[in-house]
Amino acid sequence: MRRSALVTRLEQHLAMTAEERDTLDWAERREMRFTPGQLLMEQDRPNDMLYIVQQGWVHSARRLVNGSRQIVGFHYAGDLVGTSSIAWSLATNTVTAVSDCIVSELSKGALGRIFKAQPRLAGALYAISAADYVAMGDRLTSIGRMGAIERLSLLLLDIIARLRVTAGGVVDSFDLALTQQDIGDAVGLTKVHVSRTFGDMEKRGLIERSGRRVRLLAERDMIAMTGFVDRHGVIETNWIPAPE
Amino acid sequence: MRRSALVTRLEQHLAMTAEERDTLDWAERREMRFTPGQLLMEQDRPNDMLYIVQQGWVHSARRLVNGSRQIVGFHYAGDLVGTSSIAWSLATNTVTAVSDCIVSELSKGALGRIFKAQPRLAGALYAISAADYVAMGDRLTSIGRMGAIERLSLLLLDIIARLRVTAGGVVDSFDLALTQQDIGDAVGLTKVHVSRTFGDMEKRGLIERSGRRVRLLAERDMIAMTGFVDRHGVIETNWIPAPE
DNA sequence: CGCCTGTTTGAGAAGACTCAAAACGGGTGG
DNA sequence: CCACCCGTTTTGAGTCTTCTCAAACAGGCG
């Protein structure tokens, strides 16, 4: 059996005991495959599962009363998705596969048992959720207070930072699997304006495109302009008690 | 000694044992008082404390490279603030008192001990943080995809929903302690546009104002228009294991 | 080859922003 | 008790960004 991506993720932050690893591997069930566009979970539908992304990536979105959509986050291998079911029995978001992906289930009951038996895992999960919270604050800030170029830059920087975690070596270009509609829904712009803004960015020499492929030509400038901080690198877990 | 607001909050969601209550009461230290505008924590400064709001309310904001500000959340009695220090040693946000308030500290070490000794408390904290995460998604959605009137309506609805938790009885008006600059920073508008939009809302009969006092005249319409959902009411904690 | 989805371009409109000045209001000192 | 002061709110005028609607274009797939 493949090692769970969640275990790999937690291990980056916390030295785990064999027992802890096993507990997690045990708790994960029912590995499932999805193709781009397929839903793992639908807003307002009953749901009491959490999902662990093992491979690929998904997004989590909200449908509004006025018919539009807001993508509230992207989730990659090792992420825990659908955490709203921790607090409610109806899903608050629709979760959709962006790429081909493999996902496994973690029931709420299993989560409860982890909290009871493996407090250090619980702590690490809490730390990760705190990091996700801050990352969402970044996006909120960008949508609330930045212009179109900055918002798109931030999105590209975030995606590429995330790709670099898994892909070893230098990465400065990547295939963007999202449509411009998706991108607009993520950063709070219309697809038309996304298209124009990408054009502007090309003219300014910030990026280069061909097909789905995007290359960041002036990553340093983009970081300076947006104040981008990679929230997914180091997470401190030193407050978590040592194993006995 | 006054009962901690956090204990009161958790008790709404989870039947606690005396030992659990005591553990929390014990962990909270150094009660402090703040007046409006005082900072409890400043962005990019070292910080390894969490804060529990006991009375009053505070906001948490981000300063951007372009000089503007985004308020990412408001926190009321019973809320845990500064959770970014769970993952990093530098504060990601500036936290400022909105009203006179009383706040107590919870060290990261104490949090670690709670996770180890009181798994049910850890679970409840995790559930609350999941709820906060969803609430931030609501705000993200509103800023990304709604117009000025909807954004302000949502803010007012959220504040009043929160006031009703503490104030018994019917509440349909309240004193808004925020300046229009603050409000703009929270919903992603300029203070000038906030002023105009409040004017529009009055003309449309949605609200009525005199001085700082705001009365919601058409709450039902505002809810229908925005799809507002109160995320702070019921939180499910049934996945948390029973006490032994 | 044609179709379908997604992207680009154009033109005009709407919403929100900027700068600036005036009005308001609560608090302080004379 | 009044006059002044400061921070805040309101109003006005003009501008800029982003949106809407519409049509043309591109590219991958059956």
Image: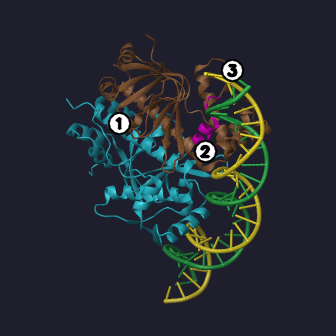
Chain colours: A brown, B cyan, C green, D yellow
- Residue drawn at x 22%, y 32% is B242
Question: Mark 1 against mark 3, which lies toward the viewer?
Answer: 1
Q: Which amino acid does label 1 sit on?
A: Pro
Q: Position of residue B141 (x, y in %)?
A: 52, 46
Magenta segment boundaries in residue numbering = A176-190
Quick one: quadrant of the C terminus of chain B? top left
* Disc 1 from disc 3: Cα separation: 43 Å
* Disc 2 from disc 3: Cα separation: 26 Å
Furthest toward the top, the residue is A1
* Residue under pointer 2: A142
Q: Which of marks 1 and 2 is nearer the N terminus?
A: 1
Mark 1 vs 2: CB contact within 8 A: no
* Residue under pointer 1: A46
**Residue B90 seen anywhere in this rendered image of the structure:** no
Mark 2 vs 3: CB contact within 8 A: no
Q: Is residue B222 above or below residue A69?
A: below
Residue A69 colored in magenta in the image = no
Q: What element carries label 3?
A: loop
Residue A178 colored in magenta in the image = yes
- Residue drawn at x 36%, y 39% is A90
Q: Which amino acid does label 2 sit on?
A: Ser
Residue A101 located left or right of residue B168: right
Classed neighbour count for the residue bearing mark 2: other residues with Cα under 10 Å, few (<14), some (14–19), many (≥20): many
Classed neighbour count for the residue bearing mark 1: other residues with Cα under 10 Å, few (<14), some (14–19), many (≥20): some
Q: What element carries label 1?
A: loop
Q: Where is residue B163 in the image (x, y as percent from the top left)?
A: 36, 58
**Residue A236 seen anywhere in this rendered image of the structure:** yes
Q: Which of marks 1 and 3 is nearer the N terminus?
A: 1
* Residue under pointer 3: A170
Q: Are marks 1 and 3 on the same chain?
A: yes
Q: Which mark is residue B198?
A: none
